[in-house]
């Protein structure tokens, strides 16, 4: 049974990879030149030094940021609301890890 499963998954993998080089190199189609839609993941955010400094400054005052303050801070720093939210979540985890290590 395990042998059949490994063969079928192996076969599926080769089906997925079994496409022609012509499809890779084909650029005649106008739709290939169109910008692709953004995927679900926008990629890793890279913050400027000034943005990090302001985020750290606010974090030292308040570990939890309210939604109105988060939106205002995001707007002031040129970031999205989600970027600020995730930054605070990650920073709290870093802070908790540091405080638990020192205890």
Image (cartoon, rainbow, N blue to C red):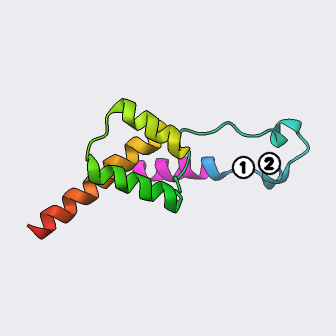
At x 13%, y 62%, the residue is 100
Disc sitting over residue 19 in the figure: 1
C-alpha span from label 1 to label 2: 7 Å
Q: Which residues are magenta?
A: 3-14
Quadrant hosting residue 78 = top right
Q: Residue 49: x percent and y percent?
A: 50, 62
Task: Judge whether residue 8 is colored magenta.
Answer: yes
- Left or right placement of residue 72 versus residue 57 in this view: right
* Comparing labels 1 and 2, the label whose residue is closer to the camera: 2
Q: Height in image: 81 above or below 95?
A: above
Q: Residues within 10 Å of mark 2 (few under 14, many from 20)?
A: few
Element at label 2: helix
Q: Height in image: 67 above or below 2?
A: above
Element at label 1: loop
Q: Mark 2 — residue? A: 23
Q: Residue 58: x percent and y percent?
A: 35, 49
At x 44%, y 34%, the residue is 71
Residue 1 visible (yes or no): no
- Left or right placement of residue 71 versus residue 67 in this view: right
Closer to us: 90 or 77: 77
Q: Do the residues bearing badges 1 and 2 touch, measured as CB atoms within 8 Å?
A: yes
Task: Name the outermost residue toward the top.
Answer: 68
Task: Name the outermost residue toward the bottom.
Answer: 102
At x 27%, y 59%, the residue is 94
């Amino acid at each position: 049974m395990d042998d059949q499963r490994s063969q079928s998954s192996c076969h599926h993998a080769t089906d997925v990879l079994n496409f022609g080089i012509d499809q890779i190199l084909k650029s005649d189609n106008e739709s290939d030149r169109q910008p692709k839609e953004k995927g679900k993941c926008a990629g890793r955010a890279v913050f400027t030094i000034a943005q990090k400094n302001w985020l750290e400054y606010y974090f030292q005052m308040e570990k939890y940021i309210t939604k109105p303050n988060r939106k205002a801070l995001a707007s002031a720093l040129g970031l999205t609301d989600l970027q600020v939210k995730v930054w605070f979540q990650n920073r709290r985890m870093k802070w908790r890890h540091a405080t638990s290590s020192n205890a």
